[in-house]
Image: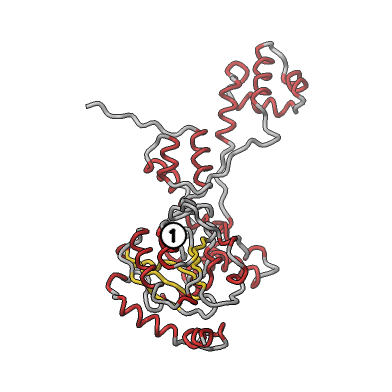
Amino acid sequence: MERKKYNGLSAAQKTELWQRWKDGQSLSEIGCALNKHPASVYTIVAANGGIAPTARCRSRIALRLEEREEISRGLAADWSIRQIALELGRSPSTVSRVIERNGGRTKYRAGAADKRAWACAKRPKQCLLARNEKLQRAVAAKLQLNWSPEQIAGWFKLTYPDNDSMQVSHETIYRSLFMQARGVLKKELIGHLRSRRPTRRSKHVSSQPRGQIIDAISIRERPAQIEDRAVPGHWEGDLITGSGNTHIATLVERQSRFTMLVKVNGKDTVSVVSALSKQIRKLPAELRKSLTWDRGMELANHKELTMATNVAVYFCDPQSPWQRGTNENTNRLLRQYFPKGTALSTYSQRDLDKIASELNQRPRKTLGFQTPADKLDDLLQ
């Protein structure tokens, strides 16, 4: 049986690969564009920790290929070293060293000499942490305390303002973590990063399909009275994810911070919209005005939700969770009840209602230490 031959990527393809990776494309998308298996793409990406290698460039003082060809022609014409150097505008000693380094007058070849110079110019340079063991140990200790690289860099700058040897950028820390070939920071320390990603990822990447929701109304078109929390009845929503691909929908009223938890049978839009519609219809009419959601495809059937509840649905900009900050903050509070890794399918709607009630009875600083339940009662009177 004849084995299939796999060819590597050319320099141009690798350049395209890294550009697509920076743009946030997935391994599958990059592989499809380059006609390569995603595993082949991952091998290249993982070897560099997801960080595009710096493009090499020649020194401005190094001999160019055309200058080496002039040397070769000069030698063929039996010119002296000084004549060749004068023609090039270079020092005779420079020309002499180049010739002797590449076989002498009889064996000198311009192409071979240029390739040899390019190969010899590649010298590995140790990064800052590799050269400073004290700083390296200090960074590792802070990472073990679950500090982020940005927090570590900022702390060093504040603590050692006049000591450049004890300062490091957060980018250097990330590179030393993800590029294990540097041999500076142990791979286990990646587990202390909040993202826990094995490679560096572009800020443009999205973990779920975005921007494919038909007729989505942007949050930018939301009326001002929703923005300034002037009236009740405007909600923010999202899904909390648990183990085994289980989910709970969360709804938070913007003015009172009143929270509702909704059991969903799946993340598909039919299941989510059906569960939300059923829960929202239980609310009085004055509390059914609008809902702001992220760009998740679980609300692709938003028109059906609006028809069933008369609630207008607005969508945040891609990768902008801060635009529904009330919901994001509430979800953090709910992690006290649903730690990451919890199987959320074990909770009944009655269980969720009980947890939501407990949360709504907790005083909130942002409400002047009123409870969300009391605040909502006041608004409805």
Query: 150 above or below 118?
Result: below
Query: 11 above or below 50?
Result: above
**Circle 1 SS class:** helix
Identify the coloring.
Answer: secondary structure
Task: From the image, tell me which residue sits under label 1.
Answer: 302
Q: Could you classify mark 1 by the number of other residues whose Cα lies within 10 Å: few (under 14), some (14-19), or many (20 or more)? A: many
The quarter of the picture where the N terminus appears is top left
Query: 265 above or below 112?
Result: below
Q: Residue at x 50, y 71 (%)?
A: 289
Q: Residue at x 41, y 34 (%)?
A: 35
The answer to which of 83 and 35 lies nearer the viewer is 35
Does residue 146 appear left or right of residue 157 in this picture? left
Residue 268: quarter of image: bottom left
Q: Amino acid at mark 1?
A: His
The answer to which of 263 and 347 lies nearer the viewer is 263
Residue 271: quarter of image: bottom left
Q: Position of residue 65 (x, y in %)?
A: 64, 25
Q: Residue at x 58, y 40 (%)?
A: 55
Q: Position of residue 182 (x, y in %)?
A: 49, 52
